[in-house]
């Protein structure tokens, strides 16, 4: 604010070096649908500290607040870029879309429990990998009928992962 | 009827002998000399001048499984906890103990029916109590205990001190009473005041939780820098501190009754007193609930410096304070009988020792035979989980000079890894 004390004895000048700074935040509502959207990311990994593990069983508790079916799979890649292992069995872990209420918002996502077993061979493959490529396959509810839905910032995906590790003697 | 009563009494005594303790049972054969007054200050002395020089007694053992009952050797010859052996050998908790009593000199002068005594000794006791849950967790991990709560808190107690005493015996008729008043100087101490550590692995996604009420005190011995960095600092145990800090007082009381020419019964209460620890007295406490909900999975994958181990080690908070404190001594109560006939000596001793708050019982019988210049004895001690403690005793008498050695568990000396206990006592005597 220029002259915030409103002191009329102060004379101010605008010169060629003067400027205004304005911060603007915009909240854009997300309304639409996605069909067969695939998102992916590649992460550098190093599980060297787990080399004493001979087998493992993971317990994954997932929940999905979005009005979208989400399927997640991750692949472990070695130095040569070869796929040596995958995180989840078959096509991956499926997070079913949260059910819609009459006001267009979703009910809180229902927790789903999956057990993922890694035997000695799979553990070795993971330990030898250097990167993990994560894929997400997304279809909003009724996207095949091009039904647009609201997406709110209160939505989220929950993942709680526990592990039982068997270590070498 | 009387026979039945005696028989029932013996059964009762055997049942009462539920836990182990062996300290000073080898003193049975030293009645009539200064080491005998360590067991009972009223034990009548044989001579006018009685001196014990440089006696040494040490004992150690466990009321749990022996080393061989818990461990096996791998191909490299190194010992490891053998989980196949554990289940059959563990109770709820067990103790490992060690104790020593090193006497520099004990002396007494007998003047008529009155005896004046004095002496010095360095005494040390240590006891470690561990729970079966702790051993099982170390052996099997926490996977078998998902959804269960384990009690892990170990109890560590150590006490080392010097004692200087003056004492007296007075005989009146068939009765002899004895008293020793002791001035104590503590050297080092570890005292577990509270040992509640409950560990739970949640069955949701295996979160970990500790519910602690653990308080441990130490004077000049234990240093806590972290869960994985606990050190025993012996630098403070020096001659500078032997007779300066950590003062305490204690008494030994005893009574003996000469039933007839051959039969003597006695009772004693030993080490009734306490020490106030004021030399670097530290109080370590961990009180509260500490939960480990896990680490952020994405952070863990992308951040190679993130350590689950470090996160776990930082989980339990320990508060360190400076605060003086007092501990009571491990007091002992004895009840004994001695029957003497010709060159034979028969002894029976019941001992109850309050070892860091736990009462330990032991029942011993012994036979002593004088042959030429030797006193030769054998003894048997009955205690919890330890039924094979057969000991020996030998004393060489050369005029006023005598030297002795005794052990409570001969088998244990030759097979220490299979034994539950071992002890040895030796020293020399002068009596005029």
Image: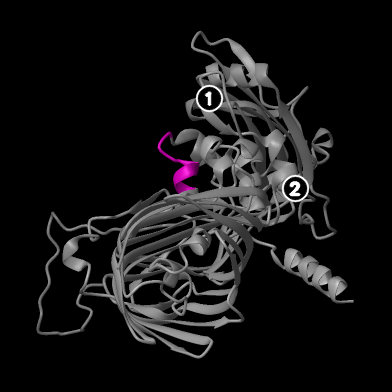
Q: Position of residue B120 (x, y in %)?
A: 28, 70
Query: Which range is magenta?
Result: B304-311
Relative to A109, say whether B138 is above or below: above
Residue A34 lies in quadrant: top right
Q: Quadrant of the N terminus of chain B?
A: bottom right
User: Is A137 on the left-hand or right-hand side of B405?
Assistant: right
| Chain where mark 2 sits | A
Local crowd at mark 2 within 10 Å, few (<14), some, or many (≥20)? many
Instruction: Tell me the mark number nearer the camera, choosing from 2 and 1.
Output: 1
Q: Quadrant of the C terminus of chain B?
A: bottom left
Q: CA distance from mark 2 to mark 1?
A: 46 Å
Q: Earlier in the sequence, mark 2 or mark 1?
A: 1
| Chain where mark 1 sits | A
Q: Which residue is mark 2?
A: A149
Q: Which residue is mark 1?
A: A51
Viewer-nearest residue: B206 or A100: B206
Q: Residue at x 17, y 58 (%)?
A: A18
User: Is B114 on the left-hand or right-hand side of B128?
Assistant: left
For mark 1, give the secondary structure. Answer: loop
Q: Position of residue B322 (x, y in %)?
A: 31, 74
Q: Position of residue B360 (x, y in %)?
A: 61, 66
> Is residue B385 shown to the viewer in this render?
yes
B309 in magenta: yes
For mark 2, give the secondary structure. Answer: strand
Residue B101 lies in quadrant: bottom left
């Amino acid at each position: 604010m220029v002259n915030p004390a409103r002191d009329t004895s102060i004379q101010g000048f605008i010169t060629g070096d003067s400027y205004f700074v304005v911060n603007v935040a915009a909240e854009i509502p997300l309304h639409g649908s996605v069909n067969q959207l695939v998102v992916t990311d590649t992460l550098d990994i190093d599980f060297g500290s787990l080399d004493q593990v001979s087998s493992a069983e993971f317990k994954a508790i997932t929940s999905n607040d979005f009005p979208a079916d989400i399927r997640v799979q991750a692949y472990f890649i070695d130095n040569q870029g070869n796929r040596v292992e995958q995180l989840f069995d078959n096509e991956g872990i499926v997070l079913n879309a949260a059910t819609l209420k009459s006001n267009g918002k979703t009910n809180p996502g229902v927790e789903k429990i999956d057990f993922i077993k890694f035997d000695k061979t799979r553990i070795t493959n993971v330990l030898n990998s250097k990167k993990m490529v994560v894929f997400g396959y997304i279809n909003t509810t009724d996207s095949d009928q091009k039904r647009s839905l609201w997406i709110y910032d209160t939505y989220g995906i929950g993942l709680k992962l526990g592990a039982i590790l068997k270590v070498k003697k | 009827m009387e026979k039945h009563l005696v028989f029932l009494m013996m059964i009762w005594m055997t049942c009462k002998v539920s836990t182990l303790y062996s300290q000073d049972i080898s003193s049975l054969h030293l009645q009539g000399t200064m080491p005998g007054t360590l067991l009972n200050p009223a034990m009548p002395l044989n001579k006018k001048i009685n001196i014990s020089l440089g006696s040494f007694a040490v004992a150690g053992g466990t009321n749990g499984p022996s080393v061989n009952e818990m461990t096996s050797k791998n191909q490299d010859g190194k010992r490891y906890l053998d989980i196949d052996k554990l289940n059959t050998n563990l109770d709820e908790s067990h103790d490992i103990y060690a104790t020593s009593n090193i006497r520099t000199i004990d002396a007494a002068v007998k003047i008529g029916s009155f005896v004046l005594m004095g002496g010095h000794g360095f005494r040390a006791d240590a006891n470690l109590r561990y729970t079966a849950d702790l051993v099982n967790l170390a052996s099997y991990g926490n996977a078998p205990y998902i959804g269960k709560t384990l009690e892990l808190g170990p109890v560590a107690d150590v006490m080392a001190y010097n004692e200087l005493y003056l004492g007296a015996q007075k005989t009146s008729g068939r009765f002899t009473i004895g008293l020793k008043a002791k001035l104590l100087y503590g050297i080092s101490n570890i005292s577990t005041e509270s040992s509640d550590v409950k560990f739970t692995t949640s069955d949701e996604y295996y979160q970990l939780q500790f519910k602690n009420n653990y308080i441990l005190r130490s004077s000049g011995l234990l240093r806590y820098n972290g869960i994985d960095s606990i050190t025993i600092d012996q630098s403070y145990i020096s001659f500078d501190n032997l007779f300066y800090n950590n003062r305490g007082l204690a008494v030994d009381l005893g009574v003996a009754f000469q039933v007839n020419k051959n039969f003597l019964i006695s009772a004693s209460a030993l080490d009734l007193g306490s020490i106030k620890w004021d030399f670097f007295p530290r109080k370590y406490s961990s009180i509260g609930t500490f939960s480990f909900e896990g680490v952020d999975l994405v952070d863990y994958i992308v951040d190679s410096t993130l350590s689950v181990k470090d996160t776990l080690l930082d989980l339990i908070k320990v508060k360190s304070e400076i605060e003086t404190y007092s501990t009571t001594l491990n007091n002992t109560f004895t009840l004994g009988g001695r029957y003497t006939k010709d060159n034979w000596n028969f002894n029976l001793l019941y001992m109850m020792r309050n070892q860091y708050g736990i009462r330990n019982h032991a029942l011993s019988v012994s036979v002593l035979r004088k042959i030429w210049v030797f006193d030769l004895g054998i003894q048997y001690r009955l205690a919890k989980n330890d039924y094979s403690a057969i000991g020996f005793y030998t004393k060489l008498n050369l005029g006023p000079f005598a030297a002795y050695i005794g052990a409570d568990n001969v088998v244990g000396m030759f097979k220490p890894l299979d034994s539950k206990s071992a002890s040895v006592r030796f020293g020399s005597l002068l009596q005029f």
